[in-house]
Amino acid sequence: MIASLTLRERRLIAGGLAIAALLLAWLLIVAPIAAGFADRAAARTELLSRYERDARAIGQLPSLRRAAVAQRRDRDRYVIATPNATVAADRLKERLSATVLAAGGEVLLVEDIARSGNVVRARLAARLDPAQLAAVLTRLRGDPPLLSIDTLTVATDPQAVVSRAGPMDVRLEASAATAAPQPR
């Protein structure tokens, strides 16, 4: 037979059941609602930061457009605009030899070097005196499209007197970026 519970035991059991009911109500009702509020607050914070980022990006659009227009305008200063890499390599070789000839030097050899991507390369061998070499390098450095002088080798007669330097054998490798011509 089951013994009857004392008043104190009944109160303890009732208190335990009340605490269990409150805990169950918290876990099933209040906690999900509180988590929903926290999730929505985090989402609101993320949306506000995204809105601020987007507003800054939209504010930068006019300056980005001006920069894009300036880059399109200056594009021919940085690339050889040709329909293909073969024509670009020919233009690079023509520019190298024309620059040497304009400075009064003698072109010995102009040839292609292996291409990579949108970059063409050429090798030039010439005979120049020091003043002509300086003029060639200055002109190659300043005239568009800008070139990258990858290697420069200068050889001279070891018997030459320093004060009266004669012609030097110069080997120069240059590269330039290429791109298709812009539509007008």
Image (cartoon, grey):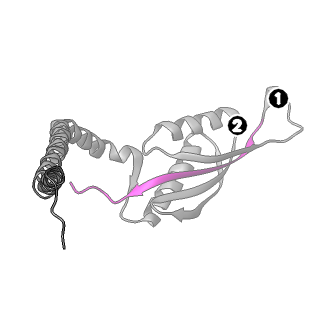
Q: Which mark is residue 129?
A: 2
On screen, residue 69 above or below 119: above
The location of residue 123, given as percent across then percent down, is 62, 56
| Side of 158 relative to 42 (left or right) | right
Taking the spot 15% from the left edge, 44% from the top edge, the residue there is 41
Taking the spot 70% from the left edge, 37% from the top edge, the residue there is 129
Q: Could you say which is closer to the camera, residue 116 or residue 80?
A: 116
Q: Is residue 101 visible?
A: no
Q: Quadrant of the C terminus?
A: bottom left
Mark 2 and mark 1 in contact? Answer it, CB < 8 Å: no
SS assignment at label 2: loop
Distance from disc 2 to disc 1, alpha carbons, whole Å, reads 12 Å
Q: Which mark is residue 162?
A: 1
Q: Quadrant of the N terminus?
A: bottom left
Q: Amino acid at mark 2?
A: Asp
Extent of the magenta region: 166-184
**Occupied quadrant, residue 21:** bottom left
The location of residue 130, given as percent across then percent down, is 69, 34
Neighbour tally class for label 2: few under 14, some 14-19, many 20 plus, Cα within 10 Å: some
Q: Which mark is residue 65?
A: none
Taking the spot 53% from the left edge, 41% from the top edge, the residue there is 140
- Of callouts 2 and 1, the N-terminal one: 2
Q: Please identify the dominant SS of the magenta region.
A: strand
SS assignment at label 1: helix
Q: How many marks?
A: 2
The location of residue 111, given as percent across then percent down, is 60, 61
Q: Could you say which is closer to the camera, residue 183 or residue 22?
A: 22
Q: Could you say which is closer to the camera, residue 109 or residue 28?
A: 28
The location of residue 112, given as percent across then percent down, is 58, 62
Q: Amino acid at mark 1?
A: Val
